[in-house]
Image: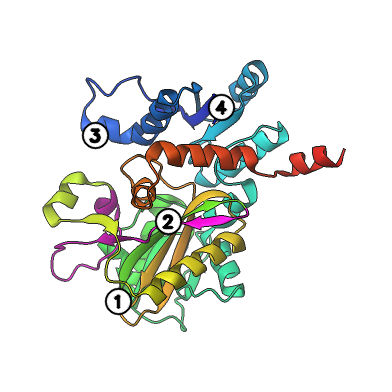
Amino acid sequence: MKKLRILVTVHESLIPPDSLEGHADREIDEWRTEFDVVSNLKSLGHEVRCIGLLDSLTELRATIQEWQPHVVFNLLEEFDGIAKHDQHVVAFLELLRQPYTGCNPRGLMLSRDKVLSKQLLAYHRIPTPQFALFRRSKRVQLPSKLRYPLFVKSATDDASLAIAQASVCADATSLKERIQFVHEQTQSDALVEEYVEGREIYVGVLGNDRLSVLPVWEMSFGTLPEGQAPIATRKVKWDRRYQKRHGISTGAAEHLPEAVLAELGRMSKRIYRALHLTGYARMDFRLRADGTMFVLEANANPNLAAEEDLARSARAAGMSYEDLLGRILSLGLGYQAAWRQSEAAE
């Protein structure tokens, strides 16, 4: 790949330093992804600038007009404190006719809206747990068709926000309490779905039109205390000490029949296309002992840190971290946005 001018967009508080030296692990964890991407792009010989965004796009527009980057490497996960608003930043880039990496605005909108995405998946007959939505502004009326245990989470937030052992509810009393908790803590609607017992499976997908599926990955919940459900709580995902204490880890899924692996690959591609995703994404599944699988959600633009699941899965397929970043750049540069199609027609 030729050397490029790359503008990396990050949250204002996550602009990485030039070196890890002198920084504590907890501090590094905050901007690890940003550091890995920026430092590796530079090591590949690209000219890289990093811009932090909070609630204004004025500097972004000025930088693009002045510097004219070949591509924007988009690492934003929110805008103005709202996770779903990252789609509007990408739409802004399309209005500027600026190539960018990762998912397009429509795919971001559909995948970020957990309820809408589940409705689309159901339309395409892709199995997902039965669910009900509880809006903040309405009185809670418990579902009669859903079967306990039930799992409660925010309808919009990611990164396991407000997910804990109490998210799995065995009765009406605990369900009401958890719905109220999600409303108050996340200021969002609560999504309640039937809890699926089974293995936690992740499948990475790369591509725009032609899709590549990465090796199947799995979360091992180690030695959680007796009575605790094997779910990806915030502590399970992000607390290093907790992970070490209980032997929680992720790695290549083992002892899966070829037929199950093939079906996971086929289903991941179907989900990717049903939600109009581009660039790269990760599909989260629950796999029952009998081989029945349910998609929990699709994550557009998942964590890109060098030691996180997507990059490790890519390495298992023979793709180095630098190769992965190069592939993501190529997909961004090659994505046929509407403005490209308009130019081609002129």
Amino acid type of the residue tagged 3 in the rendering = Arg
The residue shown at (64%, 19%) is 62
Of circles 1 and 4, which is in front?
4
Q: Residue furthest right?
A: 346
State which region is magenta.
209-237
Q: Quadrant of the N terminus?
A: top right
Task: Provide the residue designation for mark 1.
Answer: 170
Give the residue at mark 4. Answer: 2
Between marks 3 and 2, how big is the CA–CA gap? Answer: 29 Å
Disc nearer the start of the sequence (1/2): 1
The answer to if 218 sits in the magenta stretch is: yes
Which mark sits nearer the N-terminus, 4 or 2? 4
- The answer to which image quadrant residue 168 occupies is bottom left
Which residue bears the numbered disc 3? 26
Q: Secondary structure at mark 1?
A: loop
Q: Are marks 1 and 4 in contact (CB under 8 Å)?
A: no
Sequence-first disc among 4 and 3: 4
Q: Nearer the viewer, mark 4 or mark 3?
A: 4
- Mark 2 neighbour class, 10 Å CA radius: few under 14, some 14 to 19, many 20 or more: many
Q: Secondary structure at mark 2?
A: loop
SS for tag 3?
Answer: helix
Residue placed at 50% from the left, 28% from the top?
8
**Residue positioned 62% across, 17% down in the render:** 67
- Residue designated by label 2: 214
Please say if the residues under marks 3 and 1 sit with CB atoms less than 8 Å apart: no
